Image: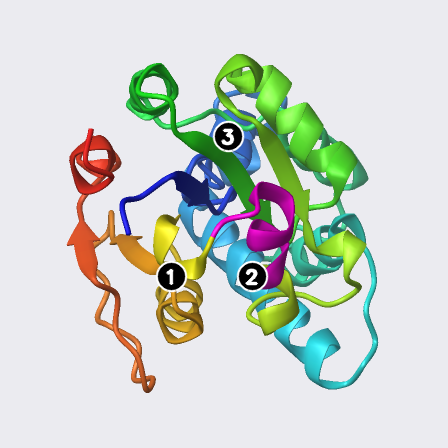
Amino acid sequence: MPITTCVFDAYGTLFDVAAAARGAASEPEFAAIRDTWPALAEHWRSKQLQYTWLRAITDAHTDFWTVTQDGLDWALEKTGHDGDPALRERLLALYWELQAYGEVPEMLHTLKNAGLNTAILSNGSPDMLDGAVRSAGIADVLDDSLSVQSVGIFKPDSRVYDLVGQRFNCAKDEVLFVSSNGWDVASATGYGFHTAWVNRSGEPMDRLPWIPNTILDDLTGIPALAGV
């Protein structure tokens, strides 16, 4: 079947999750993280993901904003900045304004001009996704933002991937699923989607039963993979 629907993870795939820490570090009042923001950003993202998995397997679901705050609190304590409430407030505010990667708008425009369905499929809550999409200026090239909040469990539960077929009335093999998370794209491969792993930082492949169909350095090659 030809690809009719291109679905993207949001955080780390379309939106740069390090942008919040990098942005705060550039502001004079937060000079304390000028040299350590990369470690802070890495710890924040790592714990954010770990907490989604732990909540999924312990049936303790919550909204992604809570998980995001919990991950940041851990990261701030880990890096010795937990005594700075102003920094915490600024980082959380910037998370609602994450920058899209540079190639994202043109790539999405190409897909839409070719008549394909385009959507986000994310752990993010609807209000977070709406804020990120509006901040990045890409609302006009996305048909929908699908959130795990509607099924009450985080990725990689199959009920999350089910949302794509339910929304677009398409078969699994009509979907190209794109993620920067190796575990996410591997799980989507096992689910039956065509998959592309955007491995910007050259990470090793996760040791899981499935592997992505394609590995890319960025998103510029997505239209070609979709047959555009």
Residue 124 seen in the figure: yes
Q: Name the residue under label 2.
A: 161
The majority secondary structure of the magenta stretch comes to helix
Is residue 149 left or right of 52 when viewed as pictured?
Answer: right
91 part of magenta stretch: no
Three-letter code for the amino acid on which mark 1 is drawn: Phe
Is residue 87 left or right of 112 when viewed as pictured?
Answer: right
Query: Which badge, 1 or 2, comes first in the chain's sequence?
Result: 2
Q: Residue at x 70, y 55 (%)?
A: 148
Q: Which residue is drawn at 21% across and 70% down?
A: 204
Residue 96 seen in the figure: no
Q: Distance between the residues labelled 3 and 2?
A: 36 Å
Of badges 3 and 1, the one in the foreground is 1
Query: Which badge, 3 or 2, comes first in the chain's sequence?
Result: 3
Q: Name the residue under label 3.
A: 25
Is residue 90 left or right of 200 when viewed as pictured?
Answer: right
Q: Residue at x 75, y 51 (%)?
A: 69
Residue 135 coordinates in the image, percent (x, y): 59, 17
Q: Residue at x 30, y 16 (%)?
A: 106
Question: Which segment did they paint magenta?
Answer: 162-170
Q: Name the residue under label 1.
A: 193
Three-letter code for the amino acid on which mark 2 is drawn: Tyr
Tags 1 and 2 touching, CB below 8 Å: yes
Q: Distance between the residues labelled 3 and 1?
A: 39 Å
Report the front residue among 24 and 226.
Answer: 226
**Res 219 → quadrant:** top left
Q: Where's the C terminus, which quadrant?
A: top left
Secondary structure under badge 1? loop
Residue 196 coordinates in the image, percent (x, y): 27, 53
Give the class, few, some or many, for how many residues have Cα within 10 Å of label 1's Cα (few <14, many ≥20): many
Residue 23 coordinates in the image, percent (x, y): 51, 26
Query: Which badge, 3 or 1, comes first in the chain's sequence?
Result: 3
